[in-house]
Each structure stands twice: as C-alpha cells, then as structure tokens.
C-alpha cells in the first residue's frame, strides 16, 4: 500500500540496474529470514536470536510473524528481571521505529503487548508512556494510531487512582484538546477527542459548559466557515442529550438555537460581502438550525425559507445534489 | 473530456506484480495473500481472470500458506496465521469453488475454531492471539465465517453490539469504542451489520449517510477518509460500497468520482495510485477498479461487485443468506 509517494517511471535500464543493486540486499535479507525460520522450527529461543529479530524488524517492521517470534523469545526468558529489562528496552526500540513508521499497525501492536506484560508484573511506567505518546502526536496531529494509543494510556492510568486524581487527568485531557484546537481549528481528531472528554470533566452544570463551548467555537466559525470539522462539533453540542437535558426550558433551548442561527447568518452575510456567494457550510448549518427550531415549534413540514435554501444548495453544492433532492421530496432533513 | 480507462495496461500491471522481484517485493511477503486477493479481484472485475492466472497455481499458493499449528492461513509460506490473510485466502478460494472442496473437512473445522477463538467476551475480534482489537477484524471474522457458513446467533448478536459501540456522535464509526470516525472503519462496520442482517441497529442512518456523502471533496471529486483530509482512491471503495449498501449512491456525484479514479491511472505502465501522479500499487488498483464497477459496471463491461463482500455478485448470490 503506497500513500503519498510520487510516481516514478524508471527506464528499462534503470530498472535493471536497480534490480542488480538489489540483489545483495535481497540475498542478505532472505538468508536472515531463512535462518530465523529455521531457528523457530528448531524451537530455539535465546538472546542471540532476539538480536537477529531486531535486525530483521529494522529492515521490515511489517513482518508480523517475526514480531510473533520475538514475543515467543521474550516469553521463554526464564528470569523475570531480564524479561522486564527486555520489555523496557523494547519500548525504546519501538519508539525509534514509530518515529520512522508512525502508521504501522504491527509496531503499535507490539508496544501494547509489551506494556500489558509490564502491567502484569506491576512495572508499567505510565508517565513515560504518556510523554512518549505526547511527543509522537506532535509529529502528526491527525495520526489516529497516536490518538488511539493516547486514549488507551489514559484509560489505564486512571485505573486504581482515586477520584480527585482522575478528575485532574480528565481536566488535563480536555485542556489538551483546547490547545490542539487553538493551534489548528481544522484538526477534527482533536474535536472528536473533545466531544468524548467533555462529558468526563466536572462542570458546575452542563448548561454553562454548553454556553462556554458555543463561545469558543464562534471565533473558529468566523475565521474559517468552510471548515467542516467545527460544524460537526456544533451539531453535537446542539443535539446531544448531555447538553440538551441540562437546558431548563424549551424557551431557553429556543434562545440558544436562535442565537446560533443569528451567528451563522451573520457569518454567511460576511462571506457574501467577501465573495459574492453564500457559504455552503453556513447554508447547511442554517437549514439544520431552522429544522431544529421548526420541530420545537411542532411543525414537521419545511417552510418556504428552508425550501429556498435547499434549492440554493442544489446549485452551490452540486456534488450532493441527490441528497438535497431527497430532502425536498421527503421533507426530512436527515438528522 | 474524459480520460480513457487503459484496461489492457492494468491487466498487464496486475499480472506482472509477481515478476518485478525487487527488494521491496521481498519486503512485502506479509501482504502477499491480501495482494493475491486484490489482484484476483481486479482481474475478475475486468473479466480477465482465467486467461491470465492459472487456477491451480493460485490454489496451490494459497494452500502452501496453511499454518497447521494455528489452523488458518498466513500471508506467505511459513508465516503465521492471521485473520486478514485468512479472509483473503477464503475469498479467492470461494471464487474458484463455492464448496471450497480444495480444503479438507479438518481444515474447515480448524478454520472455524481459529476464527471463533479470536472473539472476545465484548463481541469484538482480535486479529490473532497477540493481536489487538479493531472493527477491521470484526468484519474480517464475520465475513470469513459467512463464507464458511458458520455464523451463529450468539456471534451475530455480540459482534453487532460491539459494532454499535463504535458509532460516533458525528455519524461515522471508529476502530474501537471512542475512536474517531474513519471511512474504512465505516465500511467494515456497515458491512458487518449487512452480513448479519442487523442494519436496523443504526438508529440514525441519515446521519451516517450524510457523513459518507460529505467525504466527496472538490476540486478533485474524490473521497477523503476523514474531515479535512486529502482524497484517496481507496476511499472510492470504502465510501461508495457503504453508500451502496444503504441505497444512497445518488447522494454523491458519481461522474466526478469516476473522473477522479480515472485520473489516478498510470496511463503508461498501468495500475492506479492513491492520488494522481503518485506511485501505483495493486491495492489502489483493486479498489479503483471495484469502485468503477460500483459506479457503472456496464459502461466498462465489468462484472458487478457485491458491496458487502467485495466479491463478484455472481459468487455471493449463492451464499446462504444469514437470518437472525
Ligand atoms: Zn489509500
């Protein structure tokens, strides 16, 4: 699987010369692999072979069978002290590999395995893991392996801690997403994380929390209304029961929806002045809000206003024309 | 103006995969079984399988990857069994023989044991005994059990419950509960539910279809895998198959998508890449071509591909339909 690598057309001659140059590498690699498979067939598990698996995995970190053999060797070390040292050294070895191959599933998998073995021996150093993952996430803020691993670390850190420390950790994670988002409003991975962690953080009440969130995103909406990630988050804020149930009355909810509508219409106005065109994402949000308001008022048919905007969207967002036509026909907005 | 589809070059490209034995070729043994499935699927979609690949050679290769210790298929001879290579092996074998007569009764029963043992109490599946949990493996295991006609109500129930735990607030699915939505994970989750006849568990289907239709981006017309990411040919398959399963292909611009896929062809040497002018590989070649089949198989004189299994509909129509 090749991603993001420029296409190259080698001449026949260049291909031939590459193949010639490759021969020695191929020979060495294959003899290393053959040797390792032979050792495995002979049920050999020792530290010299362990080093050979390192050599092999440095060349080919995707070689899942070799990771399996490596784990078998580790499990066959019959001294706990040595076992722990090997696991800790492997975490360092893996960090180097992850910097080079941050999207390789097998490397992440082995890291988790090592960590779980250390957990069983009560030797896991969660702070070290946490700092490691934070550094890796700096290198690519959308890498879903990193985010996944971070959630995994946090979940494990929280085990066996008392509730005040857990609260601190949750708060810190929530603040972390604030920083990430402020660095880059388009980082949906951070928005996703925020949507999950906001429910864990203690709020005086979720109503104030909703208000704070709506304030925070306002800047982002004005700055880049074409960004789809913020809108997903706003929709979440305005429909998830965690927030909605905290709103005391229907009137308060209507006020919030009307306020949001005003904001989005204003942004769309500004876009119109700038570009002479409506902003597609704003229009989508406007019908979303109008639909919510309409339902609050007990209507279930689109009014002229919504219909007009959907007609506009057919022209302005032709990729999804079929969706808008279905909307008009069924008189349902979808969400 | 439309770019031409250079079918002959793609056929040649797929066949020659085996003959360019560069260093990189030897480094990709762990993907060889998947690669075989991608190649076979690309060829059969273009109605060019039998004249280009020798049936017995393919079957022999697959059988040589049998891991007798674990009772399933690895990716290459001597490599350990894994659920990913096991599904690829079964898919190709099923294309050649619906009854899987090339496998012994013992092999079939150890395959079933291997797969069932990978399921965890929460309904999810591991990729192998060391492996982690991922919705990819749930799909792979469920699809493989379906190919073997060995699904049970208990497995169906727990697997689909786990899948629904991976449904997110934005309408997509992630690789595990709490993980960010991703188009490939949406396919595996929707595909699993489709096999298990449990699509009705998705309460907010329109939210999901909305999320899928938002994957199409301009100016290219290709699909991305997550918000604010670049388009990539492989998502043509992951997204369009999901839309197809949910009967909403018309919610995106198929014509624009088709042009994007065509623009990713290597017109000189055949094959398709993730984006225009990038390095081709058999994975993107397969999913570009199956994507085109979903868009309009008649126009290209392709066979029809089943969006649930990513296999010829001619084959899958014989699968026993699972009823809960
Ligand atoms: Zn891709």
Image (cartoon, coloured by chain):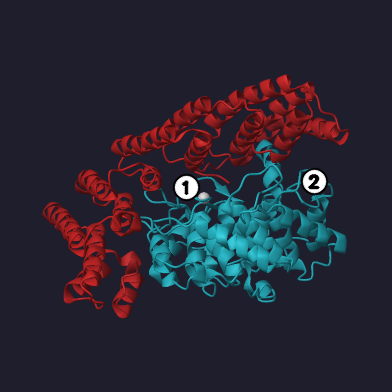
Rendered residue at 84%/31% (across/down):
A39
Residue A15 in view (yes/no):
yes
Q: Residue B77: which numbered mark, if any?
A: 2
Residue B188 in view (yes/no):
no
Tag 2 and tag 1 share a subunit: yes
Callout 2 secondary element:
loop
- Chain A: give its colour: red
- Give whichever of A127, B217 is nearer the camera: A127
State which chain disc 2 sits on: B
Residue B56 placement (x, y as % from top left): 82, 61
The quarter of the picture where residue B51 lies is: bottom right
In the rendered view, would you say B23 is above or below A209? above
Quadrant location, the N terminus of chain B:
bottom left
- Chain B: give its colour: cyan
In this picture, residue B228 sits left or right of residue B104 = left
Callout 1 secondary element:
loop
The quarter of the picture where residue B301 lies is: bottom right
The quarter of the picture where residue B260 lies is: bottom left
Quadrant location, the C terminus of chain B:
bottom right
Residue pointed to by mark 1: B277
In this picture, residue B257 sits left or right of residue A159 = left
Rendered residue at 77%/22% (across/down):
A79
- Give whichever of A180, B231 is nearer the camera: A180
In the rendered view, would you say A188 is above or below A34? below
Marks 2 and 1: CB-CB under 8 Å? no
Residue B81 placement (x, y as % from top left): 75, 48
Rendered residue at 21%/67% (across/down):
A293
In this picture, residue B317 sits left or right of residue A73 = left
């Amino acid at each position: 699987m090749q991603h993001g690598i420029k296409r190259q057309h080698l001449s026949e001659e260049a291909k031939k010369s590459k193949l010639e140059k490759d021969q020695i590498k191929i020979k060495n690699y294959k003899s290393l692999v053959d040797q390792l498979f032979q050792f495995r067939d002979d049920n050999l598990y020792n530290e010299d072979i362990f080093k050979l698996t390192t050599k092999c995995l440095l060349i080919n970190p995707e070689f899942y069978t070799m990771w399996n053999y490596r784990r078998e060797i580790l499990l066959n070390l019959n001294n706990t002290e040595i076992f722990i040292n090997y696991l800790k050294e492997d975490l360092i070895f893996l960090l180097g590999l992850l910097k080079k191959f941050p999207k390789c599933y097998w490397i992440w998998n082995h890291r988790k395995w090592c960590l779980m073995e250390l957990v069983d021996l009560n030797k896991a150093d969660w702070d070290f893991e946490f700092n490691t993952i934070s550094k890796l996430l700096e290198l690519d803020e959308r890498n879903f392996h990193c985010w996944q691993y971070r959630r995994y670390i946090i979940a494990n850190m929280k085990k066996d801690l008392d509730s005040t420390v857990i609260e601190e950790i949750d708060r810190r994670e929530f603040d972390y997403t604030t920083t990430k988002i402020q660095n880059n409003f388009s980082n949906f991975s951070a928005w996703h994380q925020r949507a999950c962690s906001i429910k864990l953080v203690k709020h005086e009440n979720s109503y104030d929390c909703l208000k704070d969130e709506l304030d925070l995103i306002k800047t982002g909406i004005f700055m880049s209304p074409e960004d789809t990630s913020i809108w997903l988050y706003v929709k979440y804020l305005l429909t998830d029961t965690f927030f909605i149930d905290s709103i005391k009355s229907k009137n308060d909810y209507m006020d919030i929806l009307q306020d949001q509508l005003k904001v989005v219409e204003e942004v769309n106005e500004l876009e119109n002045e700038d570009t002479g065109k409506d902003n597609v994402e704003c229009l989508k949000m406007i019908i979303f809000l109008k639909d919510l308001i309409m339902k609050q008022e007990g209507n279930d048919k689109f009014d002229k206003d919504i219909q007009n905007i959907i007609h506009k969207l057919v022209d302005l967002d032709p990729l999804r024309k079929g969706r808008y036509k279905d909307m008009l026909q069924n008189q349902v907005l979808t969400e | 103006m439309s770019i031409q589809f250079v079918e002959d070059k793609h056929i040649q490209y797929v066949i020659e995969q085996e003959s360019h034995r560069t260093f990189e070729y030897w480094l990709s043994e762990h993907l060889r079984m998947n690669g075989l499935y991608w190649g076979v699927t690309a060829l059969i979609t273009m109605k060019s399988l039998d004249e280009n690949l020798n049936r017995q050679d393919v079957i022999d290769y697959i059988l040589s990857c049998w891991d007798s210790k674990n009772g399933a298929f690895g990716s290459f001879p001597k490599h350990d069994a894994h659920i990913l290579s096991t599904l690829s092996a079964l898919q190709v074998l099923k294309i050649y023989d619906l009854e899987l007569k090339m496998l012994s009764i013992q092999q079939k029963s150890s395959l079933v044991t291997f797969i069932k043992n990978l399921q965890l109490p929460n309904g999810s599946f591991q990729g192998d005994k060391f492996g982690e949990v991922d919705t990819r493996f749930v799909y792979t295991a469920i699809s493989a059990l379906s190919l073997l006609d060995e699904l049970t109500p208990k497995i169906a129930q727990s697997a689909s419950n786990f899948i629904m735990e991976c449904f997110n607030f934005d309408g997509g699915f992630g690789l595990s509960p709490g993980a960010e939505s991703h188009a490939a994970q949406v396919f595996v989750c929707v595909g699993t539910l489709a096999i298990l006849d449990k699509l009705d568990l998705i309460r907010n289907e329109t939210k999901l279809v909305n999320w899928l239709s938002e994957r199409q981006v301009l100016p290219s017309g290709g699909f991305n895998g997550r918000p604010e990411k670049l388009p990539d040919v492989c998502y043509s398959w992951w997204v369009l198959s999901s839309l197809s399963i949910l009967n909403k292909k018309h919610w995106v611009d198929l014509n624009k998508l088709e042009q994007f896929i065509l623009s990713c062809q290597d017109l000189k040497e055949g094959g398709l890449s993730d984006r225009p002018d990038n390095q081709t590989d058999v994975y993107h070649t397969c999913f570009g071509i199956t994507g085109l089949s979903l868009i309009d198989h008649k126009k290209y004189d392709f066979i029809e591909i089943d969006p649930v299994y990513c296999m010829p509909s001619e084959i899958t129509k014989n699968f026993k339909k699972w009823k809960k």
